[in-house]
Image (cartoon, grey):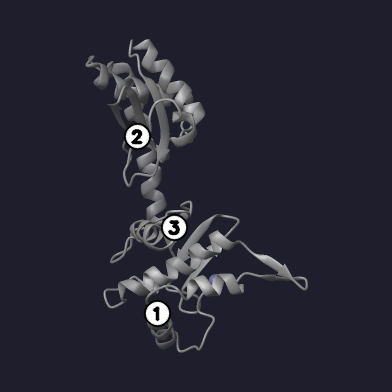
Amino acid sequence: MFCQKSLKPILEFCPMDVKLNQLISTVSANLGLRYRTVSDYYSYKSIKNTARVKNGILYVKVSDKLKDAPDDILEAMAYVLLSKIKGNRISPRYKRIYNDYIHSIIINDTSNLARGVHKPNGNYFDLENIFDKVNEKYLSNEIPKPSLRWSNRRAYRIFGRYDRSKNEIVISRLLDEHRTPFYVIEYIMYHEMLHIKYGFTYKKGRRRIHTSPFKKEEEKFPYYKESIEYLKKISGRERKFLS
Ligand SMILES: [Zn+2]
């Protein structure tokens, strides 16, 4: 969704990466475009960048996979993207610089996938998609997206965990099966997302993460009881299947 607030308070309302936006507006000016720019990184499934003009503002969304790209790569990307807006022929030099870089990160990504690192889409469930749905339905889109992945092994003791130091939600691959009800994956995701929301507190020197406000909100999940029953059944344990 593009930010469509009016021009004046734009800096307050539109999510924007200031450094990226500076680079984009410089390239835009070099091409003779005369728009205010609003640029941000966005987590697309594939590497994709978009630019469009609406109400006199140029909105640029850049794949977050380019977040660590050097400035000359981002600049080349901006020239490729904005030449289209301008209606200019795309410079082959920029095209090549950009394409070479994309090619190199795709190769790195593929080797990551082979090792099972950061792979949110499983055989039956896409964690990215589930995160977005849960965030929208139950958490007013308040939770910033962490990295999401299935566990490498088919862990059956713990079905979900949130790793604060890595800002990562991991869900057991054991559940990536056609017979797992959709709401069970949603419930686990919801539980782990509440950890992001509530953080932890200390009581009598002990770290507490499942506090009463946490539990109260957890029980609001519509299939809370059914999910617990399901997880009890497949783990053969009474509790402690989520961390
Ligand atoms: Zn927990």
**Sequence-wise first label, 1 or 3:** 3
Say if 186 sits above or below 84 in the image. Answer: below
Q: Position of residue 240 (x, y in %)?
A: 54, 81
Earlier residue among tags 3 and 2: 2
- Pointer 2 residue: 4
- Tell me the kind of residue under disc 2: Gln
Query: Where's the N terminus, which quadrant?
Result: top left
Give the residue pinned by disc 3. 148
Residue 145 lies, in percent from the top left, at: 46, 52
Which residue is painted at 60% across and 56% down in the image? 165
Hey, what amino acid is under mark 3? Leu
Check residue 107 in the rendering and tell me which mark sits there, or answer none. none
Q: Mark 1 or mark 2, which is nearer to you?
A: 2
Classify 171 as above or below 106: below
Residue 20 position, x and y percent, is 46, 28
Q: Which residue is mark 1?
A: 227
Tell me whether circle 1 and circle 3 mark residues in contact (CB < 8 Å): no
Image side of residue 221 versus residue 157, left or right: left
| For residue 28, side relative to residue 198 (left or right) | left
Q: Left or right: where does residue 240 sit relative to residue 89?
A: right
- Asked whether, in this view, residue 41 is left or right of residue 87, the answer is right
